[in-house]
Amino acid sequence: MLRIGVDLGGTKIEALALDREGREVFRRRIPTPRADYAATIAAVSSLVREIGEGSVGVGIPGALSRVTGRVKNANSTWLIGRPLKEDLEKALKRPVRLENDANCFALSEAVDGAGKGARVVFGVILGTGVGGGIAVDGKVVAGVNAIAGEWGHNPLPLPSGPDLPLPACYCGRSGCIETYLSGPGLARDHEAETGERLAAAEIASLGKESLSRYEERLARSLAGVINVLDPDLIVLGGGMSNVARLYTEVPRLWSRYVFSDRVATRLARPVHGDSSGVRGAAWLWERVE
Ligand SMILES: [Zn+2]
C-alpha cells in the first residue's frame, strides 16, 4: 500500500506517494485556492483520489487545537477555526493524520534524511517565519498543547547592543526569535544597522556583518534548545538553510551558551530540501498494511 503525503501550503498544495521502501512514485503540485476553504478541501481530495488507495498524511502551516480539534496558529488564515481533519476525512472517506508542517519537516529528515539513525532530531524552519519540530525515534512529538518545538516565539536570549530595541512581533510580544532569525528579520536588522535595503539572500551571499550578527543570535537561540532537548541533530530548513556558513560558524559559537563541557549535537543541511514537508506528511503513517 502507498503512503500519501500532502503539503498544504499558503501558495501551493503538493502531494506525493511513497511505496513501501520510501521511493517516490507520484508527485504533483497545484496552486492553493487561497481564501476558499471549500475549494481547498476539494483540491486536496481530488489530488489524493488521483493517487488512489493509501494512507493519507497532511502537513499544514498551523496546528489542530487540542481543545476544539480546529486549526489554530495558521498563516493561511482561511483554515483557522475550521475542522480540517474531520472535513478531509469526510471528503476522502478514510482516516487522515494531520500535523504541523515543521513537524513533518523534522520527521522526514529523521526517517530517511539528515537525521537517519539519530534518536532525537530538532527540525528548524528559518524562512519567512521561524518554526520548529521534534522527532524522537522516528515519531513526531506534538505536545499536549500541539506546540512542541515552536521556539520562534521564545524571546531572543541575552539581548544587548544591536539586538535592542526589541522588535515588535505579529504575535503581540516583542523580541521574539522570529523577529531576528526569519529572512525578513535579517533584512530588517541589516536595514536598521546600515540603512541599506537588501533581501536576506543577498545579505547572506555578500557575507555582510549582519550575517555575523545573525549567526551569533542563531547560536544563542539554538543553545537554549540544546539545553532543553539535547538533540543528536539539528537540521535547518527554509530559505536560510541554504547559507553554507551557518553550518560551520553556528556550532563554533553555540558552545559558550550550552551547559556542557562539549557539544556533540550536529548542525546539518536538509537532505530532502523543499520536499521534506510533503515526505514527512507521508511518513505520519509509520506503519501501513
Ligand atoms: Zn512572536
Image: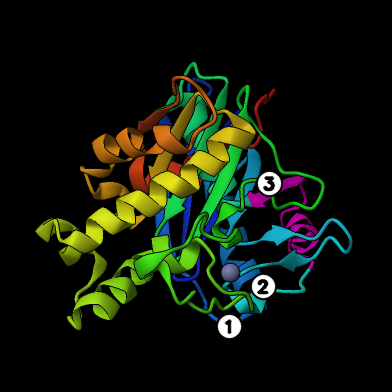
The location of residue 230, given as percent across then percent down, is 57, 28
Decide which of tag 1 and tag 2 comes sooner along the chain: 1
- Is residue 157 shown to the viewer in this render? yes
Tell whether circle 1 marks a residue whose Cβ is less than 8 angstroms from ligand 1: no
Q: Is residue 186 above or below residue 170?
A: above
Q: Is residue 159 magenta?
A: no
Residue occupying the far right of the picture: 67
Residue occupying the far left of the picture: 206
Mark 1 vs mark 3: give the one in front.
3
Q: Residues in magenta?
A: 83-99
Decide which of tag 2 and tag 3 comes sooner along the chain: 2
The mark total stands at: 3
The location of residue 64, given as percent across then percent down, is 75, 58
- Number of the label disc, if any, that sits on residue 48: none
Tell whether circle 2 marks a residue whose Cβ is less than 8 angstroms from ligand 1: no
At label 2, the amino acid type is Leu
Which residue was labeled with disc 2? 79
Q: Give the alpha-carbon distance from disc 1 to disc 2, as whole Å.
A: 8 Å
Which residue was labeled with disc 3? 148
Which residue was labeled with disc 1? 35
> With 90 as the anchor, is 150 left or right in this view?
left
Decide which of tag 1 and tag 3 comes sooner along the chain: 1
